[in-house]
DNA sequence: CCCGTATGATTGACATGTCAATCAGGAGGC
DNA sequence: GCCTCCTGATTGACATGTCAATCATACGGG
């Protein structure tokens, strides 16, 4: 038991640390490359893409601000800042909500819809090239398994 | 062949896209959680930690600015901005380089060394808890394999 | 109806990151 | 020595992200 405790408390080995660093740096490099392609294909940032995707899938191409935040998995203040920038560029509009005077509705503008259409297929193609095509079926399944385990651990440790 | 080409060009399936999103979001969530723990343990950001780690390992606890950038894997301008902030907080100092008047040497300040010592063990412990302990040995090996494959593909596609 | 509190959203201050421009100092050819 | 080009590093403008504070409105108890 003492040994068990000691083992649980030990610091990562050099090999384990290397895997960790490779993992986190690779994820980061992938995000950066995807972002660069998205930008050059469509002048959209990944944030823009998330917002436009959520709005495109929404009924009537409009969402309450807080629903949009949930759909993107963002904090509200982050969304608010980002919507300000997107509104300046004409990608979305904001209107007061009819049923709750505190609320705002975010509406996909025509220019935003066009930009999203232009971005979508090249972006998905890039995901395929850079991620899916890099892995054989076993590796893809292993990746899914690993991220599930990581997510589970993360959620277990975040609550208590 | 036609079929092969078609398959290569196809967009990701829903399942493949889900793995991709889980992968990228989990990596992001891990980074965020590690950053939060680092901050509360030591008032250091991940960027601060990278810089202090590189300086700690350097001979004489000092490095040329561009060597430091390489060690961190950062662009020079990013490093320059970050060093400005760290210098304001007394974590590092900058001196002119004796052998090249263009150059600058970055020096680990006493306060930076202290902060790094305070941060180091809890940070490594957090990596163990959140990453290493979440995976059994097979999963850890699979993770290493997957990120290697992703990195290889990324580098293959970035050059041409 | 009115008050206290909760909720939806925005704002301001600041940390972080990228890109392009700048600036000073080396290095080689003449 | 001088001119040109290369290199090391910083800077400014701006996009992005977090946190705490703010503000207006909704809502429920009395």
Image: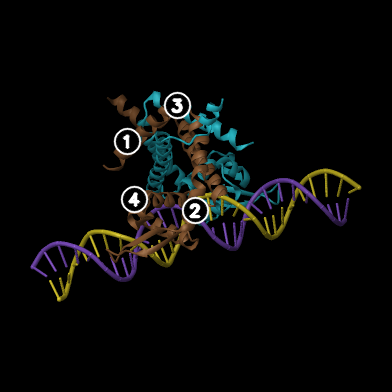
Chain colours: A brown, B cyan, C yellow, D purple
CA distance for labels 1 and 4: 20 Å
CA distance for labels 2 and 1: 38 Å
Residue, disc 2: A114
Marks 1 and 3, the one that precedes in the sequence: 3
Question: Helix, strand, or loop for circle 3?
Answer: helix
CA distance for labels 4 and 2: 24 Å
Within 10 Å of the Cα at label 4, are there few (<14), some (14-19), or many (20+) other Cα atoms? few
Residue, disc 4: A70
Question: Helix, strand, or loop for circle 1?
Answer: helix
- Are marks 4 and 2 in one subunit? yes
Residue C11 x/y as whole percent = 41, 67
Marks 2 and 1, the one that precedes in the sequence: 2
Label 2 with label 1: CB-CB less than 8 Å: no
Marks 1 and 4, the one that precedes in the sequence: 4
CA distance for labels 1 and 3: 20 Å
- Are marks 1 and 3 in one subunit? yes
Q: Residue at x 41, y 41 (%)?
A: B25
Disc assigned to residue B112: none
Residue D18 x/y as whole percent = 40, 53
Chain holding disc 2 = A
Residue, disc 1: A152
Chain holding disc 1 = A
- Are marks 1 and 4 in one subunit? yes
Label 1 with label 3: CB-CB less than 8 Å: no
- Are marks 4 and 3 in one subunit? yes
Marks 4 and 3, the one that precedes in the sequence: 4
Disc assigned to residue A139: 3
D18 or D29, which lies in front?
A: D29
Residue B48 x/y as whole percent = 49, 47
CA distance for labels 4 and 3: 31 Å
């Amino acid at each position: 038991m003492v040994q068990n405790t000691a083992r649980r408390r030990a610091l990562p080995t050099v090999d384990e640390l290397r895997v960790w660093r490779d993992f986190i740096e690779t994820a980061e490099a992938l995000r950066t490359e995807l972002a660069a392609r998205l930008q050059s294909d469509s002048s959209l940032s990944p944030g823009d893409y998330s917002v436009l995707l959520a709005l495109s899938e929404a009924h009537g191409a409009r969402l309450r601000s807080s629903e949009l935040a949930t759909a993107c998995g963002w904090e509200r203040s982050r969304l608010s800042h980002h919507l300000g920038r997107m509104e300046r560029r004409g990608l979305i509009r904001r209107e007061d909500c009819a049923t709750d005077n505190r609320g705002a509705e975010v509406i996909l503008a025509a220019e935003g819809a066009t930009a999203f259409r232009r971005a979508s297929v090249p972006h998905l193609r890039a995901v395929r090239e850079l991620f899916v095509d890099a892995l054989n079926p076993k590796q893809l399944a292993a990746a899914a398994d690993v991220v599930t385990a990581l997510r589970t651990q993360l959620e277990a440790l975040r609550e208590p």
